[in-house]
Amino acid sequence: MDSTKDIQSNEGKIIEAGGKKVAVYNDNGTLKAFSPMCTHLQCDVDWNVQDKTWDCPCHGSRFKATGEVLNGPAEKNLDSVELP
Ligand code: FES
């Protein structure tokens, strides 16, 4: 699995940290970490390289790189988490 060092500026990746999957976005050098669990029905989101969004494969919810909802059915932003 990749570590935070492998995430280029303005890219996101699902990594494993502290035994858990974490969705990490490198916001111009500042790492922002989220639970990868979609806030609709808990599928794991994937990083969309082209659009720089977190997309849920289950029912199409999309989140900004910084975790805010772009498209439902999810209504809540991704949960922020602390990197260990
Ligand atoms: S679980 Fe993500 S859109 Fe339904």
Image (spheres, rainbow, N blue to C red):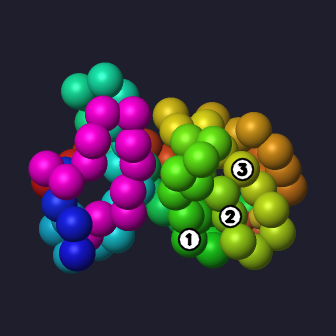
Picture quarter with the C terminus: bottom left
Query: Is 7 covered by the magenta stretch?
Result: yes
Mark with earlier residue (2, 1): 1
Residue type indicated by callout 1: Asp
Q: Contact (CB < 8 A) between labels 2 and 1? A: yes
Under circle 3, the secondary element is strand
Task: Where is residue 51? Give x, y as percent.
Answer: 63, 42
Residue 17's quadrant in the figure? bottom left
Task: Where is residue 25? Give x, y as percent.
Answer: 38, 42
Q: Distance between the residues labelled 2 and 1?
A: 7 Å
Residue type indicated by callout 2: Cys
Span shown in magenta: 5-16
Residue that carries the numbered disc 2 in the rendered image: 56
The residue at label 2 has a CB less than 8 Å from ligand 1: yes
Pick whichever, 82 or 11, lies toward us: 11
Q: Contact (CB < 8 A) between labels 2 and 3? A: yes
Residue that carries the numbered disc 3 in the rendered image: 62
Mark with earlier residue (1, 3): 1
> Badge 3, how many Cα within 10 Å: few under 14, some, many 20+?
many
Residue 55's quadrant in the figure? bottom right
Left or right: 77, with 34 as reference point: right
Left or right: 45, with 60 as reference point: left
- At x 35% / y 49%, what residue is drawn? 24
